[in-house]
Amino acid sequence: MSPTEPDQTRYIFVTGGVVSSLGKGIAAASLGVLLKERGLRVTLQKLDPYINVDPGTLSPLQHGEVFVTEDGAETDLDLGHYERFIDANLSQDNNTTTGRIYRTVIDAERHGDYLGRTVQVIPHITDEIKRSVSVLGTGHDIVISEVGGTVGDIESLPFLEGIRQFRQEVGSRALHVHLTLVPYISAAGELKTKPTQHSVRELMQTGIQPAVLICRTEHPLDEDIKAKIAGFTNVDPAGVIEARDVETIYEVPLEFRRQRLDDFVLSRFGMTAPAPDLTAWKHIVERIKAPSRGAVRIAVVGKYTELVDAYKSVEQALIHGGIEHDVEVAIDWIASEELETGLDPGFLSEYHGLLVPGGFGDRGIEGMVTAIRWARENGLPFLGICLGLQCAVIEFARNVVGLKGAHSFEFDQASPHPVICLMDEQRNVITKGGTMRLGSYVAKLGADSRAAKVYGSSEITERHRHRYEVNNDYRSRLGEKGLAFSATSLDSKLVEMIELPGHPWFVGSQFHPELKSRPTRAHPLFASFIEAGAIRAQVADTPRAAALGA
Ligand code: GLN
């Protein structure tokens, strides 16, 4: 561990057992919310056992979306939950992987830092794991570190050993939370605790005694079951928490508070803090569960639609837009390829907005272009994000400017009109990992643009993750026909946003606004897009709707 590890910081380690996908990230983030709302400085971290240095080169269909932080780290999607829940910007330090840990150790070995010694998992890898946790101690009262995967996986063993040692070294300043499943067997009409017992036993074999068990269940855990689980696992009954399925993830902090999870954790740490104020969270949950203004139907036409996790932040940002305007947002995920194999774009008339999200590779591109054309020609509110902006430019170039064969250099290197091209600094880049334009950049907004109105500002910072850009050689031709470049980089060289002035709401962004949206503070672009959808849906009027010019 780092010799500079602050001696007041408390550490919470979250592991999972029985099966994956129990919502460990949401559980960790929800505990984070409660502690933060009690006035503590909280941060969250994800320790991923895979060997990739980061998830940047992983298919979103395998691992869900790649969440990009302000400092340009390509991270696990759980960081998106963390940021949205504790309303804080995280960084590269908040996500590490086996690959990154090993790379650091091997680089040090090559540098000669271990001269004469054999480099081993214990202590060198585990020391680096502990260091990656303790660096977050500075400036925080509570560090919550979630270990990816489930207990029993070979890959997670060094992490489990690392966090075991950590607790050994800092004593009662660290505790372990374990998330398990308590399944309901309908034939027997009973909840079964055996998988939880096995999972905790497996964890204990690594030398870790959990202080808290968070039990995922479809049915309430009565006091008898809680006592039974506590008895088998040496956990205080007050530390056995029921985590029943809820309608919205934003309800989980309220559920944990109802069971006083935060009180239990603080008492274990010997800390006191004022009770949390969860008014904002109650408001979020009420708005999601019972919006008063009706529904706005959004079609998301993209390429990774089989797995909603691939668009986690887009989904959440749309929901946030709904919270802001008190409408339900009903999202349908449509594979763009379907528009290439017979689906008529007229199906979009049933929707109040079209969103084309980011993506890589040429599969489904023509379907996105077809959908965007329909939205442009039929006044359907459209939000294009990154690849979505690029497809909107391709569509406009082909069908409005008349540039036959216009395309992105990414998909057609022989296109006569590469309206989307490679950035200069990307031309000689061969390595794929971590080499895109990543992280936060400043953009300036055109004075009379919708963008400036929506943001209420002339300058913004937004997060990026892309290699290709609008080709400046085509800007004047596109502009003459009515495509407005409503935001650019400060030096005007890179297009950051496009819009169509005559259209009810047609906006594209080269950056990813969804990454900065929060349930308490919908991103302005998403809020405005949903409002435009509400106008199209003619849900009950509001002063804001009138201001936007229905
Ligand atoms: N593939 C495109 C690029 O690299 C778009 C990336 C994205 O949508 N995130 O520029």
Image: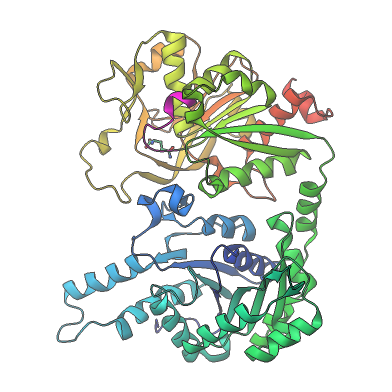
- Screen quadrant of the C terminus: top right
Residue 44 spot, x, y in % from top left: 54, 67
Task: Farthest residue to the left: give it.
Answer: 116
Q: On screen, 45 above or below 85?
A: below
- Indicate yes or no whether the magenta region holds residue 356: no
Position of residue 289 in the picture relative to residue 452 (left or right): right
Q: Quadrant of residue 242?
A: bottom right
Q: On screen, 59 above or below 117?
A: above
Looking at the image, in which quadrant does ligand 1 appear? top left
Q: Which residue appears at 51% of the width and 59% of the height? A: 90
Magenta span of residues: 359-367
Residue 270 spot, x, y in % from top left: 67, 88
Residue 16 spot, x, y in % from top left: 55, 73
Residue 38 shows in the view: no
Position of residue 222 in the picture relative to residue 171 (left or right): right
Q: On screen, 431 above or below 406?
A: below
Residue 527 shows in the view: yes
Q: Which residue appears at 75% of the width and 87% of the height? A: 227
Q: Quadrant of residue 475?
A: top left
Q: On screen, 114 above or below 317?
A: below
Q: Which residue appears at 51% of the width and 12% of the height? A: 482
- Screen quadrant of the N terminus: bottom left
Task: Please name the predominant secondary structure of the magenta segment in the image.
Answer: loop
- Indicate yes or no whether the magenta region holds residue 366: yes
Position of residue 59 in the picture relative to residue 199 (left or right): left
Q: Quadrant of residue 127?
A: bottom left
